[in-house]
Image (spheres, rainbow, N blue to C red):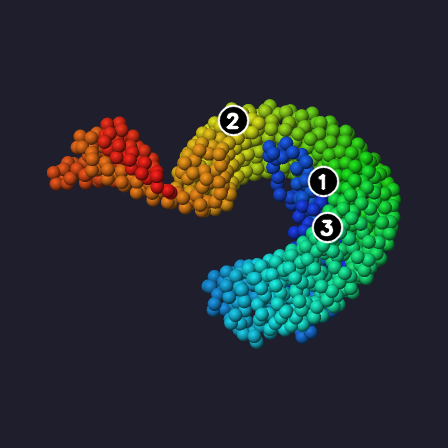
Amino acid sequence: MSEKEGTSEELEDITSQLRKESGLWSEEPEFIKETSNSLEEVCDGKPSSQICETHPRNDKLGIYDDTSALSPEKSERNEDQRKTLQSSETIALSDTFQSKSDISQSPPLSMTEVVAEYQDFTGSSHETLEKTSPQLSEENQKELRLGSDNFTVNLKAKGLQEFPKDILKVKYVKYLYLDENQIKNFKGADSGDLLGLEILSLQGNGLSSLPSEIQLLHNLRILNVSHNQISHIPKEISQLGNIRQLFFNNNYIENFPSGLESLGNLEILSLAKNNLRHIPDTLSSLKNLRVLNLEYNQLAIFPKALCFLPKLISLNLTGNLIRSLPKEIRELKNLEKLVLDHNQLTFLAVEIFQLLKMKEIQLADNKLEVISQKIENFKELRILILDKNLLKEIPEKISHCVMLECLSLSNNKLTELPKNIHKLKNLRKLHVNRNNIVRIPEDISHLNSMFSLEFSGNIITDVPIEVKNCRKITRIELSYNKIMYFPVSLCALESLYYLNFNGNYISEIPVDISFSTQMLHLELNKNKLLIFSEYLCSLTNLEYLDLGKNQIRKIPPFISNMISLHVLILCCNKFEAFPIEVCTLENLQVFDLSINQIQDIPSDICNLKRIQKLNISSNQFICFPTELCRLQSLEELNISQINGRKLTRLPEELSNMTQLKRLDISNNAIIEIPRNIGELRSLVSLNAYNNQISYLPPSFLCLHDLQQLNLSGNNLTDLPSGIHNLFSLKEINFDDNPLLRPPIEICRGKQLYTITHYLQRADQRDEKILEKIFNIVAKNITETNFKVLCQKLNLAISETDMSTKSTVSLSERVHQALNRWKTDSNNLSLTTAALRDQLTRTLMMIGAYEIMDKITALKLFTCAIKF
């Protein structure tokens, strides 16, 4: 096994180790995903939730743009959000508690079956019955197939508008998943067929209320009606005596459901993301409740009723308006997880420290100024999240929390860490980003279990040499500090694969970095590097390298040794010529060379066979580098020139990049789009704002996959009538154009339907006006002028016309000729408005002033009519 594979496997084992070592996760969970998913939503963008590591090779490939180049703080925040998303899965694990009571009385299900059932609730692909209901379409019938347990039917997103009553007659069904349909009630269902249901999921059906027939489901154990429009829960729900798990997330419930207090067997209740303002005292009668999720409601106080739920293990009140905790909280003797992120807590009631079974506390984004020394009582605590508060110090007695594995203190006002922090022998993650920490304590070397260390955004000047004793460290974040010298001690960490030194003052790379061959991800953006060090070229396993915002002018030839490099960022440096050495990196997928002084691209760039994203914006290209058109694998190209020399045209060869999905040519001086632009069949996004484009070629309407189009700040006067052919468009912007057809007022709403509707009406109007002009010409033109008109319009008078001259009136012959001219012109893709303008210009040229007076009067009349 390679070192890289070993590192990856070790990281993947961390989650399972956390579960095994904690009593919370000692058994296989009864429910997996509903509560977990809601936690993941909460964790989006929340630095405090950084609990678990992931391998950087799994990250999405990023690319640097001009905007982020000018805003390092923004890129730092994005990095936090990315890590938060990686970690939310592990946080969710602590919500998976197994019920000790039997799941079903007759017959009981195994724990494995219950897990399998609930995985279906959140989109797992569960097998379904082979035989189907006659009311389903043929396609749906084909998709139903025999399930592994013969009791499950999954009809997610089948377009059903009625309850599939006939399915229940075909086979005995226990587990029914009807998510993402339009089912409003159980109308027509036989009550006898419903009795066997044990799991029913109706997520995302647009339900405004629960059907009263719900009371018929006496054997129901799990009900999920999340993501609907329910504002009221009927009292009939109290008839569900066997219910164990209820999920009402993402609805419009304002009043706590009456009748719930009679559900004595209820173990899991989730009412996340509703509009609850009050919790009744009767809730305390739910003596078997183990998991309660009330996150993102409107609760202004911590409901005292919650304190008298004797079996409660997990309580989530994230995103409410709670300012304090009641002293009665001490009654929650079995509580193991408490989540109160995003509230308004200013202090913690001392009684909370009497909850001796506590394993996880999340209190991020509150207003806490102090943590009591009584935190020493939490002997079982594994995870403590205190990010984004007002803490100036952490109590020394935190060292008594000997089981602590994750401590996150980012975004506070700390100047130092507790002196006894080295006693936390089980600590694996220590995150202290964006504080006022001056130094990392030398005693950190005693934290032998540490694998993630983050001190970004502080005022640290150096890293203690003792950190080399933390042999298990895999990830270090030290960006935006005051570090001047690359810490050689880090090169001794054999497991270190991720290292971030962005925003420091490092000017050279030590030779010792050559020994860190296990390194996968290295960031040194915004430092003082003058050269691309040859020592970096020894990192043969490196996949991601960011050296942007330095003063590098050239690349060493040894870069060819970096055979694993996938992402290379060299933006905002001093390159005056394209570094041809980069073209030896056959596995490179993302390359950012924006904001330099490059004037041309070498033909060797075609050696980048796997390149997918290329950013060469804000350079000094004399013309569009046609060499780029040979990059068959390229999916994203950014050649915006907000700070560079403006391009005036695009080559026809652009159409050769058939895999191109995103193209940014904004902030140039481009006059026209290539005629064959329609050959870029894969194009999804086109940014061409702030140019001089006045016309969209006909082939533009062949970009059927285009979803995002920005042509603001150009010279467009009219849009093509066939724009409705761009049926995939979701985002459009035509602002700051001199548009007449349609008027800019129509386009400001940025709605394709509105624009299309206007153009269709405009076409009909133009057709009628052109027909009236034809009538005016036919009735008033002389034979002599008719011959001259035909010559000017390149209309040949055929022998047939000459032979019928004596039998067909001049008016009819003029009509026939003009209609023939119109047909020929339409074949050349000329619009009706263009034909009208050409005809009036020609009439003026031949001196048909009387006809022109009548046409002018017609124009004035039509302009006076509201359109």
Which residue is identified by label 1?
498
Q: Residues within 10 Å of mark 2 (few under 14, many from 20)?
A: many
Q: Which one is nearer the viewer's eye here, 519 or 479? A: 479
- Residue found at x 69% / y 52%: 319
On the question of residue 180 being in view, the answer is yes
On the question of residue 588 being in view, the answer is no
Image quarter where the C terminus lies is top left
Q: Give the distance between the C-alpha atoms of the residues marked 2 and 3, in whole angstroms.
A: 50 Å
Q: Percent position (x, y) of residue 287?
A: 75, 67
Q: Amino acid at mark 1?
A: Tyr
Q: Which one is nearer the viewer's eye here, 840 or 617? A: 840
Q: Residues within 10 Å of mark 1 (few under 14, many from 20)?
A: many
Q: Is residue 223 left or right of residue 282?
A: left
Q: Amino acid at mark 3?
A: Asn
Q: Percent position (x, y) of residue 46?
A: 69, 46
Of marks 2 and 1, which one's residue comes earlier in the chain? 1
- Residue found at x 78% / y 43%: 390
Q: Which one is nearer the viewer's eye here, 684 or 599? A: 684
Q: Is residue 227 above or below residue 850?
A: below
- Residue found at x 25% / y 38%: 774
Q: Secondary structure at mark 2?
A: loop
Q: Is residue 366 left or right of residue 796?
A: right
Q: Residue furthest bottom?
A: 192
- Residue found at x 82% / y 38%: 415
Q: Is residue 454 left or right of residue 663?
A: right
Q: Percent position (x, y) of residue 627?
A: 51, 30
Which residue is identified by label 3?
343
Which residue is identified by label 2?
646
